[in-house]
Image (tube, grey):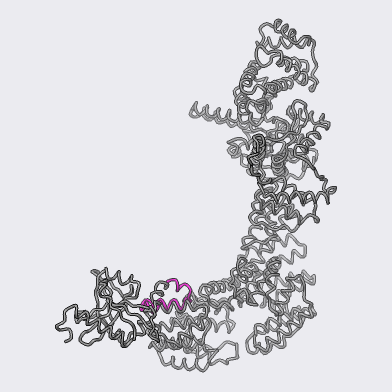
C-alpha cells in the first residue's frame, strides 16, 4: 500500500505530486505550490493557451491525500467535512476554489468546486460531496471553464439575468438552476447577453454544444428551444427541442418531440411528420400528436378549418388542463369562424400559461375578429388592444420581436379611434414609448403620422412625415402633413400598383387593404378576390362589402340594398352606408341605417353615430340625449367619448352653464394622457364662466396651451389679469401680443398693458455712490409692490412692443405715448382730476355718507367697479348700521329670522365679512349665501383694478377738505392694504353660490350690467323670497321699500349675541359665558371701526384704540367722529373730544387739525336741518382749541376750518355766533366764566 510508512506531511506531499503531474503532463498548465502560506490553499493552477502562453486565469486547490478521506461515502461520492472558517475562506475567495481528494493507492484524484450551492451545513460544521465521476485527469475542459470566471459572474448576475429573458425560458432555467446552479447561471448569461442577436446566439450554442450545456441535459436544451421560439426562430427551436428530447424518456420525450414538430407544421412538413411519428410511439403525447397530424393532413394552401380528430374528448381533463392543447383548439376555432369558442379556448390556455405572448396574440386576434362581427361584445376591441399591449410591453423587457403585435395594436387602435394611444405606441420619447427601431418601421411611422394629424399635432406630424416610405398610404399622409392633397387619379394609380404587388407576393391582408382603398375611390377590384374567398383566406362578406362600397361611390342608390343587407353582420359596411347617406344629406335614411346597425351589431359606436347625425340635422336636444346615452356605455371608445363630451361641453357653454361644461371637459381630459390644446381652452372658458379666474389661471399655468385665436387670448388675459405673474407668464403675454398685433390690436394692447402693470424689472445693484435718500426711495418703491420681477430685456421688449403698437394703431386704441418721468405723469393726472367740475360728485358723496343712496351709485358715477369702491372706501366711510331705533330693530329681527335659511348677499357684506376673524363662522349660520353673477364679475374686476392701482403711480381719492377727487401716490402700506382687501373679498365670495339675474324688473328695468353689482342682490332676494344681507344702509332701505327683509352684519352679530345670552341665562346662568359673548360682540365693533364702518356703538376707548392703531393720524378712528350718531350717543361729547386731543397731542400733534375737522363734520351733519345751530357748534369746536387754554393760533386755525366747512355746507351764521358758541361751551362745562372767555377771545383776535 502506498500510504504505509508515510507520515501526514509526506502523504500530503505525495498528493501534491500526483495532482501536479496530471496538471503538468495532461493539461500542459502551470502548477504552483502554495503550502508555505498555510492559508487553506495548497496550490494555484494557471490555465495556458494553445501556444502555452500564460493567461492569468487561476484556480485555487485544496489537496487532501489518504485513505481516511474516502471513509465517508455519500451517494455517488464521498463526504468531505470542514469548519466554518474554511467555509468562509473558500466561498469568499477571489479565485474559484476546488477541493481535491487523492487516493494514494491508485494515484487517482477526485474533485469538487466549492460554491454556496455545493456547501452543506451539518449543524456542527460543513461538508461537500466529491463525486466519484469527477476525476482530475478528465477535468481539463471543466476547469478551463471554471477558471474563465463566467460561473462566478453568472451566479452574481443570475437574478438580474432572469428579468431580461422570456418567461418560458425563465421557467426552465429556474428548474435547471435548482439542480445545477452553475450551469443554469452560465446558460442564463449566454442567453441574456445574446438577446440582441438571438438567432446567432442559438446557432452558436447548437454548434458548439459546450460542456456546461450538454451536462445540463434536457432542461438546458429546452431552455434554448423556448428562447429561440420566443424570438421567432421556429426551425432553431425545433432542433433544440429535439436535443432536449434525446435526453428524456417516456411522456416527456414524446411531448418534446411534438414541441419540435409544432413550429415546423407550416415550414417543414416532412420533418414535422417524422418527429410526430417518433412521438406517436411514446406515451403521454397522444392528444398533441393527433392534433398536430390533423393539421398536417389539411391541405397546406387551404385557410379553412382543419378537421378535429374524431376521437378527441374535448371535455377530458387531459384536454382541459393542457395549455398547448387549448391553444391549438383556439387556433382551430378562429379558422372555423367560431370566435366565441376561440376566445374560450384562448382564455383557458392563457390561464394555464399566463405569460405566453403567442397565446395573447391569438386571443387578441379572436377578440378583434369578433368585434367586427354581428356577435361582438361591447368591450371586444378594448380587450384585443389590452392583450397586444401586454405582448409589446413584455417583449420590450426581454428584447423580443414586436413587429407583428405592435402593427396589429396600432391598426386596432385606429379602428377604435384611440389616436392618443396610437401616437404613444408609435413614437419614441418624449412623445411616446416606442423603441427607436420600432418607431422607424414604415407601418409604425405611418400610424404615428396619422395619429399626430388627427390630434392636431401638426409640427410633430410634419417631422415624422420626413421618414415615410413610398407606399400609397405613406404618400397620402405625407401630403396631408404638408397641407396638400393627392389628386384622386394619382391615388387610383398608386393603389392599383399596390394591389398588383400584394397579389404577386401572395399577401392576403395587403390585397384586401388595397382593394378597400380602391373601393373608396370608386374602383371595383372585388372580382379578383374570388380565389382568396375559395381558399378561405377571406370571407365572402368582405368581397361583397368591397363591391358595394365601390358601387356606392359611383351610384349610391344602386348600392344601398347591398350595404343595407350587409349591415346586420358587417360593421364596416354599416359605417359605409351611414356615412354616405349622411354625406348625401339623406339624414333620415342615415338615422334609420344607424338604428338598424345598433340593434343588430350592438356596438356603442353606432349610438355615438346617432348623436352625430342628430347634431348634423340640427336636432340638438335629441342629439344631447343620444350623446348621454352613448356616454353611459362603459365600452364606448375614447375617441367617440371625447367627441361626444366635447359636443356636450359646447352645448353647456352655449347656455352659459360653466359647471356642466367643466364636468364634461374634465371627463374628456381623463381619456387622454396629454389633453389637446382645444380641450384645455374649453376648460378655461368653463372656469371663467363660473367666475373663477384663479382656477382658470391655475389651469393655464399647468398646461400652458398656445393661444391661436383672439378668443383664447382674451380668455388668457381675463384669467391672468388678477394674478401675480411669473417670467413665464410675461413671456407668454409678450408672445401672444406679438402674434395678435395686426389681427387684433386691442387684444395686443391689453396684453402688453397687463404685462407692464403686472411686472417690474429686477432691482439694479446698489453701489457705494448710492446716497441714503436714494436707498430710502428704492426701498419704498419695492416694498409692497405686488408686481413680480422679470428680466430687463423682457420688460424693455414689452415697452417697445407697446410703443410700436401705439404708433401703428394709437387712434384706434384710444392710447397715446407719454414720454417723461413718472412724477410728470402723476402731476398730469392730478391736474386733470382737479380741473373738472365735481359739484355733482361732491353732493353724491355727501348723500352716500349720510346713508341716503347706495355706494354703488357713486361707483357708477366714478366709472369704477362697485367692489373697488368698497376696497378703496371711496366715500371715506361705510354706513352699515342703522341709527334710527325702528330701522335698527327691523335689521336685528330680519337677521334673527334669516338664520339657517338661504339669503341673498350683497358685496358690501362680503367686504366686511372678509375682514372679520369669524367671518366664515357667520357664513355658516345660513343654509346658503347667494350672489348674482354680475356681483361676482364685479368683484373679479375690482381685484384686477386693485392690483393695477397697487402697482401704479397712485390713485384717485376723495379730498375731505375741498370736497373733490384728488390724485395721490400710494405708500407701500397702502399698496399692501389694498391688495389684502381685494384678495380677501375675492376669497370670501368663493363661499357663495352664484345665481343669474338677467333683468331688474323691480328696479324699473335698470341695466344689470351697470346696476347689477349692488342692485342684483335685491332682485335676487325678491324673486326667491329670501332675506337680503347688506352692509349698506341705503341698499337695505331700498330693499325694504320693495318688501324685501334685510339686515347688516352689525345687526346679525347683535341678534346672535342676544340669542346666545338668552339661552345661557335660561339654562346655566353662567356669567362668564355672558361676558365672553359681550366681548365677542365688542371685538366685532372694534373691527367695524377699523373698517371705517360707522354708526356702530363705538366707545371712547374704541376710538382711542383705533387712533393708536392708525398712528394717531385722523383715519378710521376719526371717521367715527364724522358721524352724527357718535355725538348723539356720548354723554360728555366735548370732554371726550378733549381726551382724544390730549392723546393725539402726546403722539402726533400735527394731526390735531384733521381730528378737529372730523369733529366739525360730524356736528355739521348732526344739525343738517338747522344750519344756524350747526354753525354755532362748529364755531364752539373751533373755540375749544386742543387744550385749556386754547391759545390764539389754535383758535384762529379752528375758526378758519369752521368757515371753510360752513361755506362748503352753506351754513347760515346767526347773530353773535361767538357768544352763542361760548354759551354752548359753558353749558357743557368746558368754560367756567363765559364773559371772561369771550373777552379773552376778542382781545386775542380782535373783531371777528
Q: Image height check: is 561 above or below 784?
A: below
> Is residue 182 covered in magenta?
yes
Q: Write down the region rendered in magenta.
A: 159-185
Residue 538: tell me if it is visible: yes
Task: Give the residue at x 59% y 69%.
Answer: 433
* Residue 175 in view in this figure: no
- Residue at 55% of width from left, 82% of height from top? 333
Q: Is residue 22 left or right of residue 194?
A: left
Horizontal placement of 22 versus 558: left or right?
Answer: left
Quick check: 787 above or below 1142? below
Give the vertical position of 1210 relative to 866 (above or below): above
Residue 700 higher or lower than 1137, as above or below: below
Looking at the image, the residue that sits furthest to the front is: 769
Residue situated in front as seen by the camera: 54 or 64: 54
Q: Residue furthest left?
A: 5
Q: Is residue 568 left or right of residue 306?
A: right
Residue 1041 drawn in magenta: no
Where residue 577 appears, as percent x and y from the top left, is 73, 75
Which corner quadrant holds the N terminus? bottom left
Viewer-nearest residue: 991 or 329: 991
Q: Toward the viewer: 370 or 38?
A: 38
Residue 642 found in image quarter: bottom right
Magenta span: predominant SS is: helix
Amino acid at each position: 500500500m502506498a500510504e504505509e510508512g508515510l507520515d501526514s506531511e509526506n502523504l500530503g506531499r505525495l498528493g501534491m505530486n500526483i495532482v501536479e503531474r496530471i496538471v503538468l503532463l495532461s493539461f500542459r498548465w502551470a502548477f504552483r505550490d502554495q503550502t508555505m502560506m498555510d492559508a487553506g490553499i495548497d496550490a494555484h493552477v494557471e490555465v495556458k493557451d494553445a501556444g502555452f502562453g500564460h493567461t492569468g486565469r487561476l484556480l485555487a486547490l485544496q489537496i487532501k491525500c489518504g485513505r481516511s478521506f474516502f471513509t465517508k461515502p455519500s451517494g455517488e461520492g464521498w463526504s468531505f467535512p470542514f469548519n466554518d472558517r474554511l467555509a468562509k475562506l473558500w466561498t469568499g475567495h477571489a479565485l474559484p476554489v476546488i477541493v481535491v481528494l487523492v487516493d494514494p493507492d491508485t494515484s487517482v484524484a477526485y474533485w469538487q468546486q466549492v460554491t454556496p450551492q455545493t456547501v452543506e451545513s451539518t449543524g456542527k460544521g460543513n461538508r461537500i460531496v466529491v463525486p466519484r465521476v469527477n476525476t482530475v485527469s478528465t477535468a481539463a475542459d471543466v476547469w478551463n471553464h471554471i477558471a474563465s470566471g463566467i460561473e462566478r459572474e453568472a451566479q452574481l448576475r443570475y437574478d438580474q439575468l432572469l428579468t431580461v429573458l422570456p418567461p418560458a425560458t425563465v421557467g426552465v432555467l429556474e428548474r435547471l438552476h435548482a439542480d445545477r446552479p452553475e450551469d443554469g447561471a452560465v446558460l442564463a448569461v449566454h442567453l441574456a447577453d445574446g438577446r440582441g442577436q438571438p438567432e446567432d446566439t442559438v446557432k452558436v450554442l447548437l454548434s458548439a454544444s459546450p460542456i456546461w450545456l450538454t451536462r445540463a441535459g434536457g432542461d438546458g436544451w429546452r431552455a434554448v428551444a423556448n428562447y429561440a421560439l420566443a424570438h421567432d426562430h421556429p426551425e432553431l427551436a425545433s432542433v433544440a427541442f429535439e436535443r432536449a428530447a434525446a435526453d428524456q424518456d417516456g411522456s416527456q420525450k414524446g411531448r418534446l418531440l411534438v414541441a419540435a414538430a409544432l413550429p415546423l407544421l407550416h415550414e417543414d412538413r416532412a420533418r414535422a411528420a417524422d418527429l410526430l411519428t417518433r412521438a406517436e410511439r411514446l406515451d403521454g403525447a397522444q392528444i398533441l400528436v393527433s392534433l398536430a397530424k390533423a393539421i398536417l393532413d389539411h391541405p397546406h394552401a387551404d385557410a379553412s378549418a382543419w378537421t378535429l380528430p374524431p376521437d378527441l374528448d374535448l371535455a377530458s381533463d387531459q384536454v382541459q388542463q393542457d395549455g398547448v392543447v387549448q391553444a391549438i383548439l383556439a387556433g382551430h376555432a378562429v379558422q372555423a369562424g367560431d370566435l366565441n369558442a376561440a376566445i374560450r379556448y384562448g382564455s383557458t390556455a392563457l390561464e394555464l400559461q399566463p405569460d405566453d405572448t403567442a397565446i395573447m396574440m391569438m386571443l387578441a386576434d379572436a377578440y378583434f375578429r369578433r368585434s367586427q362581427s354581428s356577435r361582438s361584445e361591447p368591450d371586444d376591441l378594448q380587450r384585443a388592444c389590452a392583450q397586444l399591449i401586454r405582448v409589446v410591453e413584455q417583449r420590450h423587457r426581454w428584447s423580443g420581436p414586436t413587429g407583428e403585435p405592435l402593427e396589429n395594436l396600432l391598426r386596432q387602435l385606429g379602428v377604435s379611434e384611440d389616436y392618443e394611444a396610437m401616437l404613444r405606441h408609435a413614437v419614441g420619447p418624449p412623445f411616446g414609448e416606442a423603441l427607436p427601431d420600432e418607431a422607424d418601421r414604415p407601418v409604425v411611422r405611418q400610424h404615428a403620422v396619422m395619429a399626430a394629424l388627427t390630434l392636431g399635432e401638426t409640427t410633430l406630424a410634419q417631422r415624422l412625415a420626413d421618414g415615410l416610405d413610398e407606399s400609397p398610404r405613406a404618400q397620402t399622409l405625407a401630403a396631408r402633413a404638408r397641407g396638400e392633397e393627392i389628386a384622386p387619379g394619382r391615388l387610383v394609380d398608386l393603389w392599383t400598383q399596390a394591389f398588383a404587388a400584394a397579389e404577386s407576393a401572395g399577401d392576403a391582408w395587403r390585397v384586401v387593404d388595397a382593394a378597400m382603398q380602391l373601393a373608396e375611390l370608386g374602383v371595383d377590384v372585388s372580382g379578383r378576390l374570388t380565389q382568396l374567398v375559395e381558399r378561405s383566406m377571406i370571407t365572402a362578406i368582405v368581397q361583397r362589402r368591397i363591391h358595394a362600397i365601390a358601387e356606392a361611390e359611383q351610384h349610391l342608390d344602386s348600392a344601398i340594398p347591398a350595404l343595407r343587407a350587409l349591415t346586420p353582420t358587417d360593421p364596416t359596411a354599416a359605417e359605409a352606408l351611414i356615412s354616405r347617406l349622411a354625406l348625401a344629406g339623406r339624414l333620415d335614411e342615415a338615422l334609420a341605417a344607424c338604428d338598424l346597425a345598433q340593434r343588430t351589431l350592438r356596438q356603442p359606436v353606432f349610438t355615438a353615430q346617432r348623436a352625430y347625425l342628430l347634431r348634423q340635422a340640427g336636432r340638438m336636444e335629441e342629439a344631447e340625449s343620444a350623446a348621454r346615452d352613448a356616454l353611459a356605455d362603459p365600452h364606448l371608445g375614447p375617441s367617440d367619448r371625447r367627441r361626444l363630451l366635447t359636443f356636450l361641453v359646447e352645448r353647456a357653454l352655449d347656455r352659459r352653464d360653466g359647471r356642466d361644461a367643466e364636468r364634461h371637459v374634465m371627463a374628456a381630459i381623463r381619456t387622454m394622457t396629454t389633453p389637446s390644446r382645444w380641450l384645455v381652452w374649453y376648460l378655461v372658458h368653463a372656469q371663467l364662466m363660473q367666475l373663477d379666474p384663479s382656477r382658470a389661471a391655475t389651469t393655464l399655468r399647468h398646461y400652458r396651451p398656445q393661444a391661436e385665436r383672439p378668443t383664447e387670448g382674451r380668455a388668457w388675459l381675463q384669467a391672468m389679469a388678477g394674478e401675480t405673474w411669473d417670467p413665464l407668464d410675461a413671456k407668454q403675454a409678450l408672445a401672444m401680443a406679438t402674434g395678435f398685433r395686426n389681427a387684433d390690436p386691442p387684444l395686443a394692447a391689453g396684453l402688453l398693458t397687463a404685462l407692464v402693470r403686472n411686472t417690474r424689472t429686477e432691482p439694479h445693484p446698489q453701489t457705494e455712490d448710492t446716497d441714503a435718500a436714494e436707498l430710502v426711495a428704492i426701498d419704498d418703491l419695492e416694498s409692497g409692490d405686488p408686481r413680480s420681477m422679470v428680466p430687463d430685456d423682457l420688460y424693455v421688449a414689452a415697452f417697445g412692443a407697446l410703443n410700436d403698437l401705439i404708433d401703428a394703431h394709437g387712434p384706434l386704441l384710444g392710447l397715446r405715448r407719454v414720454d417723461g418721468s413718472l412724477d410728470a405723469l402723476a402731476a398730469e393726472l392730478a391736474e386733470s382730476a382737479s380741473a373738472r367740475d365735481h359739484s355733482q360728485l361732491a353732493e353724491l358723496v355727501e348723500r352716500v355718507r349720510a346713508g341716503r343712496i347706495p355706494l354703488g351709485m357713486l361707483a357708477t358715477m366714478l366709472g369704477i367697479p362697485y367692489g373697488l369702491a368698497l376696497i378703496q372706501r371711496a366715500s371715506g366711510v361705510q354706513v352699515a348700521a342703522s341709527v334710527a331705533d325702528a330701522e335698527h330693530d327691523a335689521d336685528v329681527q330680519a337677521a334673527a329670522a334669516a338664520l339657517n335659511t338661504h339669503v341673498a348677499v350683497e358685496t358690501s357684506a362680503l367686504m366686511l365679512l372678509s375682514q372679520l376673524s369669524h367671518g366664515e363662522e357667520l357664513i355658516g349660520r345660513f343654509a346658503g349665501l347667494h350672489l348674482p353673477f354680475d356681483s361676482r364679475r364685479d368683484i373679479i374686476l375690482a381685484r384686477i383694478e386693485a392690483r393695477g392701482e397697487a402697482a401704479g403711480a397712485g390713485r384717485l381719492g376723495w379730498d375731505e377738505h375741498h370736497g373733490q377727487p384728488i390724485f395721490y401716490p400710494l405708500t407701500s402700506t397702502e399698496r399692501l392694504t389694498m391688495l389684502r382687501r381685494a384678495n380677501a373679498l375675492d376669497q370670501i365670495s368663493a363661499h357663495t353660490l352664484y345665481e343669474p339675474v338677467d333683468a331688474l324688473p323691480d328696479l324699473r328695468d335698470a341695466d344689470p350690467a351697470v346696476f347689477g353689482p349692488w342692485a342684483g342682490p335685491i332682485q335676487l332676494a325678491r324673486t326667491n323670497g329670501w332675506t337680503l344681507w347688506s352692509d349698506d344702509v341705503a341698499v337695505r332701505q331700498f330693499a325694504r321699500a320693495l318688501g324685501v327683509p334685510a339686515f347688516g352684519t352689525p345687526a346679525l352679530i347683535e341678534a346672535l349675541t342676544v340669542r346666545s345670552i338668552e339661552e345661557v341665562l335660561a339654562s346655566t346662568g353662567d356669567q362668564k359665558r355672558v361676558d365672553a359673548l359681550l366681548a365677542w360682540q365688542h371685538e366685532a365693533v372694534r373691527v367695524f371701526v377699523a373698517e371705517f364702518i360707522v354708526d356702530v356703538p363705538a366707545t371712547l376707548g374704541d376710538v382711542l384704540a383705533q387712533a393708536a392703531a392708525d398712528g394717531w393720524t385722523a383715519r378710521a378712528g376719526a371717521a367715527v367722529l364724522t358721524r352724527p350718531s357718535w355725538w348723539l350717543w356720548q354723554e360728555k361729547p366735548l370732554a371726550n373730544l378733549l381726551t382724544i386731543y390730549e392723546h393725539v397731542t402726546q403722539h402726533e400733534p400735527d394731526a390735531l387739525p384733521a381730528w378737529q375737522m372730523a369733529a366739525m363734520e360730524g356736528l355739521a351733519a348732526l344739525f343738517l336741518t338747522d344750519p344756524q345751530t350747526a354753525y354755532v357748534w362748529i364755531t364752539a369746536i373751533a373755540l375749544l382749541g386742543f387744550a385749556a387754554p386754547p391759545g390764539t393760533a389754535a383758535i384762529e386755525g379752528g375758526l378758519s376750518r369752521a368757515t371753510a366747512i360752513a361755506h362748503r355746507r352753506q351754513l347760515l351764521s346767526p347773530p353773535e355766533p361767538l357768544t352763542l358758541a361760548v354759551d354752548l361751551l359753558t353749558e357743557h362745562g368746558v368754560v367756567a366764566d363765559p364773559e371772561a372767555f369771550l373777552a379773552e377771545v376778542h382781545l386775542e383776535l380782535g373783531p371777528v
